[in-house]
Image (cartoon, coloured by chain):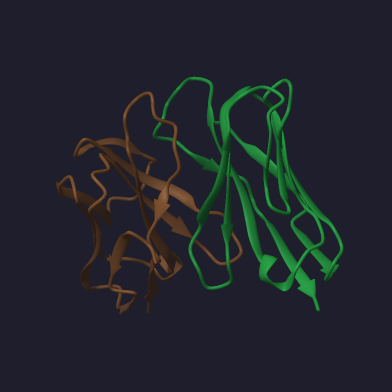
Chain colours: A green, B brown
Amino acid sequence: GQQVMQIPQYQHVQEGEDFTTYCNSSTTLSNIQWYKQRPGGHPVFLIQLVKSGEVKKQKRLTFQFGEAKKNSSLHITATQTTDVGTYFCAARGRSGNTGKLIFGQGTTLQVKP
Amino acid sequence: DTEVTQTPKHLVMGMTNKKSLKCEQHMGHRAMYWYKQKAKKPPELMFVYSYEKLSINESVPSRFSPECPNSSLLNLHLHALQPEDSALYLCASNKGRRSDTGELFFGEGSRLTVL
């Protein structure tokens, strides 16, 4: 079945440092979504990328979708303690089964003040 | 605040009990989902309902029985569960049209403990 690999599993940074998490798939993806889950919370949608090579920004967050639509990244500039949580990528395969959104393993970000 | 409401927030049950988890949304979404999430793991898809019909069952054991009474409600009936079924059960919804690949709206989850 389709799998989405996400690295690193954990990242500890000093407040103000940058952070990046990566997602990779062996198959071409129709789109990729990113979610954030705060400790004790539920996943909250951040963004969806659809086009090859797409780059989107949300304040200090930059999301990229690879040219081959097989990888994606989330970069946070100058982390803050409010960025703490687990970031998941999630993807559907090119087969177009819109029901089956598969999550990567997640990257848990800790920010030291 | 989430627009997907799940009850109860916490549930403790014995292995012989029968209980149900409930989920409700009033966004007019036509696809609803059950995910299971263990600690420090990603959400794992269990079931998908599309237009009130079960469209995906990810080989979930029969002790979990989903039900979609109408387009706003989704239930998960639990019977004869095992301790390893203890987890956070997340309900989610989205528009569900075939062309729609939009975001999932998650509820806050029901944290289940099986003794």
Above or below: residue B45 compared with residue A67: below
What residue is rendered at 73% in x and 54% in y? A60
What residue is rendered at 73% in x and 28% in y? A66
Above or below: residue B45 compared with residue B101: below
In which image quadrant can residue B51 be found?
top left
Q: Position of residue A37 (x, y in %)?
A: 56, 62
In this view, the residue farthest toward the front is A59
What residue is rendered at 78% in x and 64% in y? A79
Q: Position of residue A96 (x, y in %)?
A: 45, 22
The answer to which of A74 and A2 lies nearer the viewer is A74
Indicate the quadrant containing the C terminus of chain A: top left, top right, bottom left or bottom right: bottom right
In-image side of A113 versus B62 (left or right) = right
In-image side of A106 versus A97 (left or right) = right
Indicate the quadrant containing the N terminus of chain A: top left, top right, bottom left or bottom right: top right
In which image quadrant can residue A48 be found?
top right
Q: Where is residue B113 in the image (x, y as percent from the top left)?
A: 39, 75
Count of marks overlaid on the render:
0
Q: Position of residue B89 (x, y in %)?
A: 39, 62
In-image side of A53 versus B74 (left or right) = right
Above or below: residue B100 compared with residue A11: above
In-image side of A57 versus B30 (left or right) = right
Above or below: residue A90 compared with residue B16: above
The answer to which of A96 and A20 lies nearer the viewer is A20
What residue is rendered at 32% in x and 66% in y? B81
